[in-house]
């Protein structure tokens, strides 16, 4: 993150308060995943790949996640 001028403009004030833009982005995605179990929603909202969206869904809902026979 931070490749754009807007990214540079927000990082300094965030760091002054002990935050990191990248961490806030991850937290926002995880929070959204906690409110839905729809990976397509995360893909559309955040531009994630299907695999990444599923990782967030599994992290947010570990009790509902089953092992994936392809990756296990």
Image (cartoon, rainbow, N blue to C red):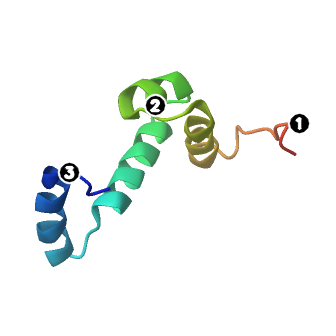
Q: CA distance from mark 2 to mark 1?
A: 23 Å
Residue 13: x and y in percent read 11, 68
The residue singled out by tag 2 in the image is: 42
Cα gap from disc 1 to disc 3, whole angstroms: 40 Å
Of the numbered discs 2 and 1, the one sitting upstream in the chain is: 2
Camera-side residue: 7 or 55?
7
Disc 2 or 3, which lies upstream in sequence? 3
Q: Quadrant of the C terminus?
A: top right
| 3D distance between C-alphas at marks 2 and 3 | 23 Å
Relative horizontal placement of residue 68, taking residue 26 as reference (left or right):
right
Q: Residue 50, position in %: x, y?
A: 59, 30
Residue at which label 3 appears: 4
Report the residue marked by disc 1. 69
Relative depth, front residue between 7 and 65? 7
Left or right: residue 8 versus residue 58 is left
**Going 36% across and 47% down the picture, which residue do you hit?**
28
Nearer the observer: mark 2 or 3; the answer is: 3
Give the class, few, some or many, for how many residues have Cα within 10 Å of label 1's Cα (few <14, many ≥20): few
Identify the secondary structure beneath mark 2: helix
Q: Is residue 63 left or right of residue 35?
A: right
Based on the displayed image, in which of its 4 quarters is residue 2 positioned? bottom left
The quadrant holding residue 54 is top right
The mark nearer the N terminus, 1 or 3, is 3
Task: Give the quarter of the figure containing the N terminus.
Answer: bottom left
């Amino acid at each position: 993150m931070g490749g754009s001028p807007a990214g540079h403009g927000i990082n300094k004030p965030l760091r002054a308060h002990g935050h990191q833009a990248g961490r806030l982005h991850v937290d926002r995605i995880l929070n959204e995943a906690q409110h839905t179990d729809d990976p397509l929603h995360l893909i559309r909202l955040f531009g994630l790949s299907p695999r990444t969206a599923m990782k967030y869904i599994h992290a947010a809902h570990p009790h509902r996640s089953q092992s994936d026979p392809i990756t296990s």
